[in-house]
């Protein structure tokens, strides 16, 4: 049974424990709240607010509880107990730090958009839900699929590495109030004396983030369903009011996008319709991740019934100009000045200056200090980093520390400034700015030299593919996998013991070699054409490389949710990046020596390393990306020199980093594509360069993908209902190799041979036979071998059947 109360009580110490010599982010001494039993007595609470908070727990308690439940090792009650303990700890933590507006319903067992789907009863018919309160079976089937049914589509949450479950909607769908989670969690907090602000995904953003269900015309207007979902929102609002809620937060992040007038008008319709429900209630409309466009700002700030507006002043610096031009009298401004997307300590003096400027416009009693977005995008608590370099640690603030920063700013704004706290912050910032370990002049010069030049392989891709085929001699529809194979408990144990120095380097190397040999043998038995070594030596596709690059530092517990129970531990890029030594050559060469088939060298690309790290904020992102590109270039050339003929440079996060506003996208795509080309510009025509992308909408950047000039791209396709193929149906010509994924690896479901063959036939209808590859959607690291082996067996069988059919058709 999974029960973690003792662990939770240790992990969620109140912020008073943050007064470490290397980490001055302690709470102002008189801002604490004393928690006595289940009740709380507030000593001092200023106008402070947190948009949302991490759910997984400081030691990934929810992850382990979820996976134990999914594996049938623990009960639903065990899972619910762990979840409740986490929620209570978080609320007490924020109350203890003095936060006034504490969020509830930001916890989720999987995803907040899926929670909204459950709230609305918007369950796709294939899951056989027959009404009533939605339970775990239906909920997790939508999220993960099951033995017979595929999961719903998963895609990136705006420009973050968090994935949400995309709602599938149509005109025949009947909506009903089917999950009372928001109300039950509000009541749960109230029972311990914490009055929270329930957070709900707003109705317009929910519809704009949805897609037409299978069988529904792609032109179907999702906003036409607004009138059908608003009655459910009214029920939720009424129930929250009856429970005692005085504030409700509606997250409407789509307001930062470039929306046309029709979509903007939907906000007017929605909140005008809901206005009567708001009587006696304060309503906050929260935005984040970018500036709010002028037209959207004008519309939302003119709405009746709205009490306050939340804006991101970290990524949305231009919003301040709009506020200067006018802000509605009597309304609250929730000012997101503490960065919810990165882990650097806030520049408190600068933030306070911004707040004073806002105060002069909206008034002292209407200004609330907030985070720029939910803190779910950052690590949980710096207290748990006992092994982190002390100097660098003093430069950082994780979610728990950001809570303290928010309240410190609120108190300073109220003329109750903690001078010692601000002085410690100033000293930490000065230390970072002057530290010699941040700057490497040689690296800066090399990166600066890249800016004015173009880097591209001299030979056209069609000619390169001909040269590569002569050397590799691959069959039609060659099969491969994306890189990783299952990471077994035994494998993780070996890495853990080596890191803890419990086994020797020789023992570790032999264990990894043995694992590689198993993976190579399995692929040969399955008759896969281009092999991978399975990446048994790697903990994470970014962290593994960052550990071997200068300019990076790592945490032990700096986990961030990516999707469901999947967490990543982003490296922290604090200084200039360089590669002291080869990183993968030994393992790739070892794997190649075990087979006569081509063995892919596996690398993570510079844009993905950048976007999946906590990046330094003291220089432009593209400068850091160019530095990483030069490091990967060195690795590519060393792999080629070692005899590796196929090298995959994954850029899974290329689309993720695309700015949300169209006016900023061309510049990003220019330097991102350039960074990728830098990595492989020097290789021979016969060296085949692959890249991989997944779980984003690539159709609108297809020209940039072509411009990357890779020889082969493998790309997610199956979970998104083969959305990718539509771009080729519309006439885009693609001359390089391409492998749209033939099955979804994020689901335990095993695809049949017929199903895979059908998918490949759909690809053959729009793509040339000689450029098509057959592969899964993504890496296999999160799956088990009893799922991987039959799925790959069916994949290879499907490719062979189609080869026979193609040969007989000639």
Image: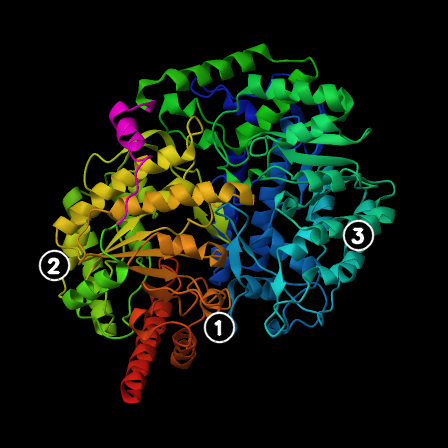
* Residue occupying image coordinates x 67% and y 19%: 357
Q: Secondary structure at mark 3?
A: helix
Along the polypeptide, which appears first: circle 3 or circle 2? 3
Does 452 appear in magenta? yes
Tell me whether circle 1 and circle 2 mark residues in contact (CB < 8 Å): no
The residue under label 3 is 269
Q: Which residues are magenta?
A: 438-456
Please tell me the numbered disc located at residue 218. none
Along the polypeptide, which appears first: circle 3 or circle 1? 1
Q: Position of residue 664 (x, y in %)?
A: 51, 41
- Tag count: 3
Please tell me the numbered disc located at residue 147. 1
Residue 671 quadrant: top left
Q: Position of residue 689 (x, y in %)?
A: 26, 56
Q: Secondary structure at mark 2?
A: loop
The residue nearer to you, when weighing 231 against 772, is: 772
């Amino acid at each position: 049974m999974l029960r973690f109360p003792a662990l939770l009580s240790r992990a969620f110490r109140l912020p008073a424990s943050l007064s470490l010599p290397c980490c001055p982010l302690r709470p102002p001494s008189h801002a604490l709240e004393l928690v006595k039993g289940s009740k709380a007595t507030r000593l001092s609470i200023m106008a402070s607010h947190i948009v949302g908070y991490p759910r997984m727990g400081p030691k990934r308690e929810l992850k382990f509880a979820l996976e134990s439940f999914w594996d049938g090792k623990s009960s639903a009650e065990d899972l619910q107990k762990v979840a409740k303990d986490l929620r209570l700890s978080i609320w007490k933590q924020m109350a203890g730090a003095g936060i006034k507006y504490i969020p509830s319903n930001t916890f989720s067992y999987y995803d907040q958009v899926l929670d909204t789907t459950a709230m609305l009863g918007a369950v796709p018919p294939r899951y056989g839900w027959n009404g009533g309160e939605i339970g775990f079976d239906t909920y997790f089937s939508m999220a993960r699929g099951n033995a017979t049914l595929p999961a719903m589509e998963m895609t990136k949450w705006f420009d973050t590495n968090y994935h949400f479950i995309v709602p599938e909607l149509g005109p025949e769908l009947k909506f009903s109030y089917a999950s009372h989670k928001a109300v039950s969690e509000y009541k749960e907090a109230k029972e311990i004396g914490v009055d929270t602000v329930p957070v709900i995904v707003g109705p317009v953003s929910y519809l704009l983030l949805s897609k037409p269900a299978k069988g529904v015309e792609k032109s179907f207007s999702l906003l036409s369903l607004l009138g059908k979902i608003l009655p459910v929102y009214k029920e939720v609002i009424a129930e929250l009011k009856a429970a005692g809620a005085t504030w409700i937060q509606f997250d409407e992040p789509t307001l930062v996008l470039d929306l046309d007038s029709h979509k903007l008008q939907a906000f007017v319709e929605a909140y005008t319709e809901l206005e009567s429900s708001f009587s006696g209630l304060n309503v906050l409309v929260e935005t984040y991740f970018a500036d709010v466009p002028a037209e959207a700002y004008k519309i939302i700030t003119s709405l009746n019934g709205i009490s306050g507006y939340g804006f991101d002043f970290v990524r949305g610096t231009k919003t301040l100009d709009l506020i200067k031009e006018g802000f509605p009298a009597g309304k609250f401004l929730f000012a997101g000045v503490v960065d919810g997307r990165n882990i650097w300590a806030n520049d408190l003096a600068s933030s306070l200056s911004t707040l004073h400027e806002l105060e002069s416009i909206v008034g002292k009693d209407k200004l609330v200090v907030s985070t720029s977005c939910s803190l779910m995008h950052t690590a949980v608590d710096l207290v748990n980093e006992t092994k982190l370099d002390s100097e660098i640690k003093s430069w950082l603030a994780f979610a728990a520390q950001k809570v303290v920063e928010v309240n410190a700013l609120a108190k300073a704004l109220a003329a109750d400034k903690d001078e010692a706290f601000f002085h410690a912050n100033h000293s930490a910032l000065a230390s970072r700015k002057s530290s010699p370990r941040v700057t490497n002049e040689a690296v800066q010069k090399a990166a600066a030299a890249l800016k004015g030049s173009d880097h591209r392989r001299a030979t056209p891709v069609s000619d390169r593919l001909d040269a590569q085929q002569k050397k590799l001699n691959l069959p039609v529809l060659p099969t491969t996998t994306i890189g990783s194979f299952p990471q077994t408990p035994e494998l993780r144990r070996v890495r853990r013991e080596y890191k803890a120095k419990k086994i020797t380097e020789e023992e570790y190397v032999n264990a990894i070699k043995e694992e590689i040999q198993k993976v190579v043998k399995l692929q040969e038995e399955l008759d896969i054409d281009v092999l991978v070594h399975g990446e048994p030596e790697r903990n994470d596709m970014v962290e593994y490389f960052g550990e071997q690059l200068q300019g990076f530092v790592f945490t032990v517990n700096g986990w961030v949710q990516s999707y469901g129970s999947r967490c990543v531990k982003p490296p922290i890029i604090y200084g200039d990046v360089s590669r002291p030594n080869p990183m993968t050559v030994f393992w790739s060469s070892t794997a190649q020596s075990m087979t006569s088939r081509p063995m892919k060298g596996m690398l993570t690309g510079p844009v993905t390393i950048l976007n999946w790290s906590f990046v330094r904020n003291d220089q432009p992102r593209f400068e850091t990306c160019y530095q990483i590109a030069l490091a990967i270039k060195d690795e590519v050339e060393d792999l080629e020199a070692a005899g590796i003929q196929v090298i995959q440079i994954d850029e899974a996060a290329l689309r993720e980093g695309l700015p949300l506003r169209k006016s900023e996208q061309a510049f990003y795509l220019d330097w991102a594509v350039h960074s990728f080309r830098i990595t492989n510009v020097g290789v021979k025509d016969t060296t085949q360069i692959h890249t991989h992308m997944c779980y984003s909408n690539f159709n609108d950047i297809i020209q940039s993908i072509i411009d990357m000039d890779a020889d082969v791209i493998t790309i997610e396709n199956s979970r998104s209902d083969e959305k990718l193929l539509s771009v080729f149906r519309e006439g885009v010509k693609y001359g390089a190799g391409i492998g749209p994924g033939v099955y979804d690896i994020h689901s335990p479901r095993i695809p049949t041979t017929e199903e895979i063959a059908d998918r490949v036939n759909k690809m053959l209808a729009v793509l040339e036979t000689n450029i098509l590859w057959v592969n899964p959607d993504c890496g296999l690291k999160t799956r088990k071998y009893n799922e991987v082996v039959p799925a790959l067996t069916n994949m290879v069988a499907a490719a062979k059947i189609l080869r026979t059919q193609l040969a007989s058709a000639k």
